[in-house]
Amino acid sequence: MNLQFIFSLAIIAVSAFAKRVDRHQHHDESQSNDQTSLLVELSNLKYNLTWYSDFENQEVIFEVFLLKPKEMEVNRWLMFGFSDHGKIEGSDFCLFNYDGNRNFIDGYLNDKLEPKIDFHQDCFLEDLDWKNGTIRFRRKFTTCDIRDYAVEPGTTQFLLATGLDEFKSMNDKNVSYHLRYNMILQYPVKFPANDPDAKTMTILAKDAPVPPQRTTYWCAIVKLDENLQNQKHHVIKIEPVITEGLEQIVHHMVLFHCAAEGDAQYVFNGNCLSSDMYHMCSKTLAAWSMGASTVFYPKEAGLPFGGSGFRPLVMVEIHYNNPKLKKGLRDHSGFKLTYTPNLRPNDAGILEVGHIYSDANSIPPGQKAFPLTSYCIAECTQKLPEEGITIFGTQLHAHETGRKLWTSHFRNGIKIGEVNRDNHYTHHWQHIMALQKPVKVFPGDVLTTTCVYDTADKKEFVFGGYEINNEMCMNYIYYYPVSEIEVCKSAVDNSTLRAWFEKHGVDGSNKTYFHQKYQQLESKWNQSMTDDLIELYTSSKINMACLNHTGQLFEGHKTGWEKIDVPQTFAGIFEKHRDSHECPAIND
């Protein structure tokens, strides 16, 4: 059984604090990707927090709408904070009505979680209607204040709090707070209007029993209406369907098409690892994880569905995470597809880039910022269409120790841009980023995906793999027109890694797994070995997973996709990122 597809999207994305509310704006002419609001529920206080990014003036305008303004006490304060990677200490905040002054104070939380006032004030009240419970305030994207949070593209981690009377510490009994996740900086991306000829279908697990165990992978192979073979359609919208009450249990879902003759032949509803689960399905149609919302396809493309030769079998794979070992849970989650007979100009696809799921890609303990970079090399991208592909959306993914993730784009060895970047990544909240400016990738281009991990609080190695305590690094790329390539991922070459272990006094043979070899080094691990491992990861030969839609390696490569030189890449002539020395922030 091919684990590449059993665990194709091990998304670890549970929020321990509050459920997220998605608000999509629906218009007659177009649909927007805006996610610019949060419903906040604190002790004795509920409000809607909305925001607007003013790119011309480089500032964010926030508005607060109290749901029960008459119950707002005159001595109640509100804190709107910004956390770097979910840490409470060091958080930047805008504090309203401190000491009953009905104004804003810019401050931060020290290491004792006590509020301190900034020397330079960067939170400004714009409008206040106390009677009707509305507050509007603003702050700059970037203030160049070492105590302030720099608002950047990607995930924003909000720290929202309230209390009565004097605010002395976040530890006070009367303080109520939540950590929430969303994006502040969102460039507007418009999608086509609703298609009057579109239909919908749901593809769901069938009353799946969620056992009282930490991790379960459930596979539901569903037979579709054979009439779909009569006409090709385009899927133009994909929505998650999550069973009520299981929002914190359903970690991720993937929808596969059983397209190849070697894929599953019959319906099935059971554990993916059960003995009677003989065949998997290999072609990815859709993926969802907590934080992701509805996927809208652009007017230029749709996901091909149906038509002559279409095998009417699909598989929903669901990863359940049940850390509290709850009993008696039943699930019927899955996907809702909106599809139309009105075909768009291009067929769309999903390309998975990043690291091969392997303990060869492992991170030593005690590291504040440990980088791992994977490669989608030119020899694999040569299999893209001659006219290239257009990327219109991406979803970055890592597990618990991932902090910064990005995919870079190289042509002729020179970095010409980035596909997507999230410097504030959290596994609690993941999203599909619709690109304001689509990225064009041609045959022979190189894509590198980098993840920076924080294992400062770990005493043992974090191994690459599928489990919650393992790590991943990947990007799911939404693009058109569809190509032959399903997966383009890499890992350090096995024989090179074995030689590295021999150099450090560990048996390099096949008698033990890589994670066992790493474990033998833990007791004597030091900074010199960390530097040595980084050099190995960045310079050694690599193995490639350049896979087609059946999950097989493309044939004909001169080395069988093993022992390949790392592509020579160089930075471009400019970088569009804040320099931490010129413009400091708590993010650094």
Image (tube, grey):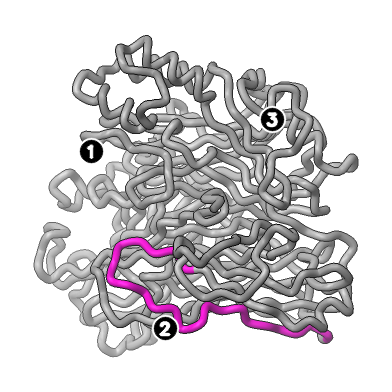
> Given the image, on which type of amino acid does mark 1 rest?
Asp
Pick the quarter of the image with the C terminus.
Answer: top left
The residue that disc 1 covers is 457
Q: Position of residue 95 (x, y in %)?
A: 29, 61
> Given the image, on which type of amino acid does mark 3 rest?
Ile
Rendered residue at 58%/33% (across/down): 490
Under circle 3, the secondary element is loop
Image check: 314 left or right of 505?
A: right
Image check: 117 left or right of 477?
A: left
Q: Quadrant of residue 546?
A: top right
Q: Are marks 2 and 3 in contact (CB under 8 Å)?
A: no
The residue that disc 2 covers is 244
Q: Position of residue 220 (x, y in %)?
A: 55, 73
The residue that disc 3 covers is 377
Q: Nearer the viewer, residue 496 or 375?
A: 496
Q: How many marks?
A: 3
| Numbered range of the magenta stretch | 197-218
Query: Where 96 sits versus 247, above or below?
Result: above
